Image (spheres, rainbow, N blue to C red):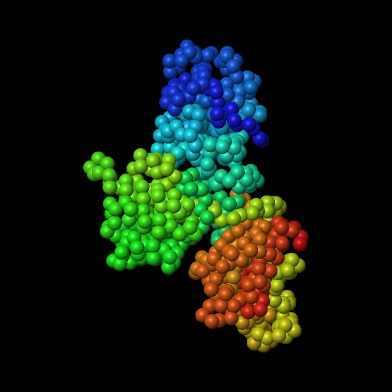
C-alpha cells in the first residue's frame, strides 16, 4: 500500500501510548532533540508521565496526533492502532514484537500480524518490532532509548531493519550529519523502499543509506532507485545475509556461483545503488557523497608528507577500481617549482617534510597536484591527540587544502589513516567547509571507489524479469540443448540411441572424433559416463558397453578451443533471475571466477562482465594467441536469456560453452523446469 508518511516523519504533535521506562524515554528524547510540538502521554491508570499530564485513552486526546509511539504489549497494540486509525492519526511506531516476525515458529504471531494490518488500514505504521525514528532536522525522536545524533540543517538519511544497528550508527563520531534515522522492523506494512521514497522527497536530505537484511519488494526498490536517479540523490547500501534457497540449489555450478549474495550485488548494481561491505565504509561513503556528491571519475590524487603513508595509500587501492594517474609534464613542472629538486614526483605523492609549516608552499603543492581531470584529491593527515598534543600546525594543511580545492574546482578531502585520528570537531568543521573528512585509509578508498561508481553516467534499466516458474522437472541434456537451440544457442551435431551398436553407427554420420555421453545420470563425468575424442565406431561401441546406461548421446567434438565458459541462469527467490558468466569446464571449481547480472541484461553489460573475468585475457588473445569469437559468446548468452524469458526456469546451465576463434558451442547443458517445451 502507498501511505503518506509526512505527518509521521515530521509531526507537530506526538502521542506516547503506554507506561514504564520505554515510553518515558520517548518523551525524554523528544525534549532532548528540541521537539517544539505537543507531546500527549496516554495511559488509563496514570495521571502523569514524565511530568506531563496523561490522557486516559486515544479518544480523549485533544486532537488527532500526527505521530504516535505505541509502547504496549502486542495484543493491546492492535486495539490502540484501531483507535488511532479512528482518530485519523498520522501514523504510529509499533514497538512490540511477536507478530509476523515469529510466523515461522508460531501461527499465532502471523495471525496477530494480519490483525494489526487490518486495524491499521490506511494509517501508516512502522514495524512492528522496531525502535521508531529520529528526525534531526526538525527535532523529532519517536525513540525509546539513547542515541548520539545532533540537530542539523541537512544531511543523509539512514534506514535499517535493526534497531540496535541504528543506535550504533547514531553514535558515530565521523562528522557525518544525520538527517533521519529510521528503523523498519519487520516491515509488516511499510517497507524500506517506501520509507526511503518519503525521506528522499525531503529537500534537506542529500543521500540515502540502506542497511538491508532482506529485500521484500523488488519492484518497490526499482521505483526507489528511479526516484533517487531523478532527484540526483545517491543511495548506498550495506546488504547482509545469505539465502537458504540459493544455498540449497546445488544441482549445477551456476547455483553455487550465483548465490543470494551475488544476486543482491547484481540487483543493487543494476539499480545504480552503491554497495559497501562494512559499516565504516557505509558511513564514509555517505559522508563523501554528502559533501562532494558522486565523483566524476575514479582518477585520484594523493598527497602525504611520508613515503610510508604514500605506500599505504597505494596498497590500500590495490585491487580497487581507483586510479592514481601518472603526473603529466605540466603537473611535474609546477610541483618541481614548489618542492625543489630533492623530492621524487609521483602519484601518490610524498612531498616530504621540507614544506611542513610553509603555507604558500603547501598550497602551491596541493594545487599543482589537482589536475582538473581528476575525480578527487586528498591529503593524508592524522591529527594528534587533543588531550596530550597541539594540532596548531595542522591548521596550515587544512587551509592549504581549502585553497587548492577552490583553485582547482576538484572535490578534495583529508584522510586520516586511522579512524581515531580524525577528531569529530575537526571532521564537522571540514564538512562545513566543503572538504571531505575521511576516517580510516581503507574505508576512505572504499568510499572513493563507490562514489566514482555512482558518478558514472547511467540510463534507467529495463524492469527486471521476475515471473516465477511453476514446479520443477529435469530435462535430459539432449532435451535441454534442443530447447536452447530454438532460441539461438549453438549446439554440436548429435544423435541419440538406446544401444551401443546403434550409437556406434550414428557416430559415423557426425564424423570422427566424437564425444559419447551416457544418459540418465546427474553427474556423468564422475560416473565415467563421458568419453571424449573417440576416433572410430569401435571405440564408440566399446565406450558405450563400459557405461552403466540404457541410452546414449553422441556428439561432434569441438576442436580449436581458446577458452571454456560457463553461462547459466538461476532463479534467486529474493532477487529475480541471476545470469552468471564464469570460467567453465574444469576451471569453474578451481578459479571460482564469475560475474553475475540480472535478467534481462544488455549485450553491453554482458560484454563488460566477460571482460572482468580473470580469464578475460584468453578471450582477447593471450600472449599473441588468436582472440576468441566474443560476439558468438554474446549471441549465446543473449539466447539463454531469451529462453528463460520465454520459458521461466528454475535453473539453466551451459558448461562448458567452448569458444573458438570463429564460434561458441554449448558442449553440455542442463535445464530444471516444469512442463512441456
The foreground one among 412 and 139 is 412
Confirm whether residue 492 shows in the render.
Answer: yes
Q: Quadrant of residue 597?
A: bottom right
Q: Quadrant of residue 390?
A: top left
The foreground one among 161 and 100 is 161
Q: Is residue 518 above or below residue 2?
A: below
The foreground one among 403 and 200 is 403
Q: Residue at x 27, y 59 (%)?
A: 354
Residue 50 % position (x, y): 43, 18
Farthest residue to the left: give it.
388
Residue 90 % position (x, y): 60, 25
Q: Residue at x 61, y 76 (%)?
A: 628
Confirm whether residue 264 shows in the render.
Answer: no
Q: Residue at x 58, y 67 (%)?
A: 610
Q: Is residue 162 left or right of residue 478?
A: left
Residue 582 % position (x, y): 57, 66
Residue 652 % position (x, y): 65, 62
Q: Residue at x 60, y 31 (%)?
A: 5
Amino acid at each position: 500500500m502507498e501511505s503518506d508518511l509526512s505527518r509521521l516523519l515530521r509531526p507537530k504533535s506526538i502521542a506516547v501510548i503506554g507506561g514504564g521506562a520505554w515510553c518515558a524515554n520517548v518523551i525524554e528524547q523528544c525534549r532532548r532533540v528540541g521537539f517544539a510540538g505537543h507531546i500527549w502521554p496516554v495511559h488509563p491508570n496514570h495521571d502523569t508521565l514524565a511530568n506531563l499530564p496523561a490522557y486516559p485513552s486515544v479518544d480523549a486526546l485533544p486532537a488527532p496526533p500526527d505521530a504516535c509511539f505505541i509502547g504496549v504489549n502486542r495484543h493491546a497494540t492492535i486495539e490502540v492502532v484501531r483507535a488511532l486509525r479512528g482518530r485519523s492519526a498520522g501514523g504510529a511506531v509499533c514497538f512490540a514484537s511477536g507478530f509476523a516476525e515469529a510466523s515461522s515458529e508460531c501461527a499465532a504471531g502471523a495471525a496477530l500480524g494480519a490483525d494489526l494490518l487490518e486495524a491499521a488500514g490506511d494509517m501508516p505504521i512502522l514495524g512492528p518490532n522496531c525502535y521508531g525514528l529520529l528526525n534531526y532536522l526538525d527535532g523529532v525522536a519517536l525513540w525509546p532509548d539513547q542515541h548520539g545524533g545532533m540537530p542539523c540543517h541537512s544531511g543523509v538519511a539512514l534506514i535499517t531493519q535493526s534497531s540496535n544497528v541504528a543506535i550504533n550508527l547514531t553514535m558515530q563520531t565521523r562528522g557525518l550529519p544525520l538527517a533521519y534515522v529510521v528503523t523498519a522492523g519487520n516491515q509488516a506494512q511499510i517497507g524500506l523502499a517506501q520509507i526511503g521514497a518519503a525521506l528522499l522527497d525531503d529537500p534537506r536530505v542529500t543521500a540515502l543509506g540502506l542497511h538491508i537484511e532482506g529485500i521484500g519488494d523488488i519492484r518497490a526498490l526499482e521505483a526507489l532507485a528511479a526516484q533517487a536517479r531523478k532527484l540526483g540523490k545517491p543511495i548506498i547500501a550495506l546488504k547482509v545475509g545469505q539465502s537458504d534457497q540459493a544455498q540449497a540449489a546445488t544441482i549445477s555450478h551456476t547455483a553455487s556461483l550465483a548465490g543470494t549474495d551475488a544476486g543482491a550485488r547484481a540487483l543493487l548494481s543494476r539499480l545504480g545503488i552503491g554497495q559497501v561491505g562494512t559499516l565504516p565504509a557505509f558511513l564514509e561513503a555517505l559522508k563523501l557523497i554528502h559533501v562532494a556528491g558522486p565523483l566524476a571519475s575514479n582518477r585520484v590524487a594523493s598527497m602525504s608528507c611520508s613515503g610510508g603513508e604514500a605506500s599505504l595509500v597505494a596498497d590500500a587501492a590495490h585491487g580497487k577500481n581507483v586510479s592514481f594517474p601518472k603526473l603529466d609534464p605540466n603537473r611535474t613542472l609546477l610541483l618541481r617549482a614548489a618542492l625543489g629538486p630533492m623530492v621524487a614526483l609521483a602519484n601518490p605523492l610524498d612531498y616530504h617534510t621540507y614544506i611542513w609549516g610553509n603555507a604558500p608552499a603547501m598550497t602551491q603543492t596541493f594545487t599543482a597536484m589537482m589536475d582538473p581531470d581528476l575525480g578527487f584529491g586528498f591529503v593524508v593527515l592524522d591529527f594528534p591527540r587533543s588531550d596530550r598534543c597541539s594540532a596548531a600546525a595542522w591548521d596550515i594543511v587544512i587551509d592549504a587544502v581549502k585553497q587548492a580545492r577552490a583553485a582547482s574546482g576538484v572535490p578534495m578531502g583529508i584522510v586520516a589513516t586511522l579512524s581515531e585520528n580524525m577528531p569529530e570537531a575537526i571532521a564537522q568543521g571540514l564538512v562545513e567547509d566543503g572538504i571531505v573528512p575521511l576516517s580510516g585509509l581503507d574505508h576512505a578508498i572504499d568510499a572513493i571507489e563507490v562514489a566514482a561508481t555512482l558518478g558514472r553516467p547511467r540510463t534507467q534499466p529495463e524492469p527486471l524479469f521476475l515471473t516465477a516458474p511453476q514446479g520443477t522437472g529435469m530435462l535430459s541434456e539432449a532435451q535441454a540443448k534442443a530447447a536452447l537451440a530454438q532460441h539461438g544457442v549453438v549446439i554440436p551435431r548429435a544423435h541419440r540411441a538406446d544401444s551401443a551398436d546403434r550409437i556406434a553407427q550414428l557416430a559415423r554420420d557426425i564424423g570422427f572424433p566424437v564425444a559419447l555421453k551416457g544418459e540418465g545420470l546427474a553427474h556423468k563425468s564422475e560416473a565415467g559416463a563421458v568419453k571424449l575424442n573417440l576416433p572410430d565406431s569401435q571405440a564408440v561401441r566399446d565406450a558405450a558397453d563400459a557405461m552403466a546406461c540404457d541410452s546414449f548421446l553422441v556428439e561432434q567434438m569441438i576442436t580449436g578451443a581458446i577458452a571454456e565458459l560457463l553461462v547459466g541462469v538461476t532463479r534467486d527467490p529474493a532477487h529475480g533471475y541471476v545470469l552468471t558468466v564464469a570460467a567453465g569446464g574444469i576451471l569453474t571449481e578451481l578459479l571460482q571466477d564469475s560475474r553475475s547480472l540480472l535478467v534481462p541484461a544488455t549485450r553491453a553489460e554482458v560484454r563488460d562482465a566477460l571482460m572482468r573475468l580473470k580469464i578475460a585475457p584468453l578471450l582477447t588473445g593471450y600472449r599473441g594467441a588468436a582472440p576468441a569469437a566474443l560476439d558468438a559468446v554474446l549471441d549465446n548468452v543473449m539466447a539463454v536469456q531469451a529462453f528463460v524469458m520465454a520459458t521461466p526456469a528454475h535453473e539453466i546451465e551451459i558448461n562448458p560453452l567452448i569458444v573458438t576463434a570463429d564460434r561458441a558451442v554449448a558442449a553440455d547443458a542442463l535445464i530444471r523446469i516444469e512442463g512441456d517445451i
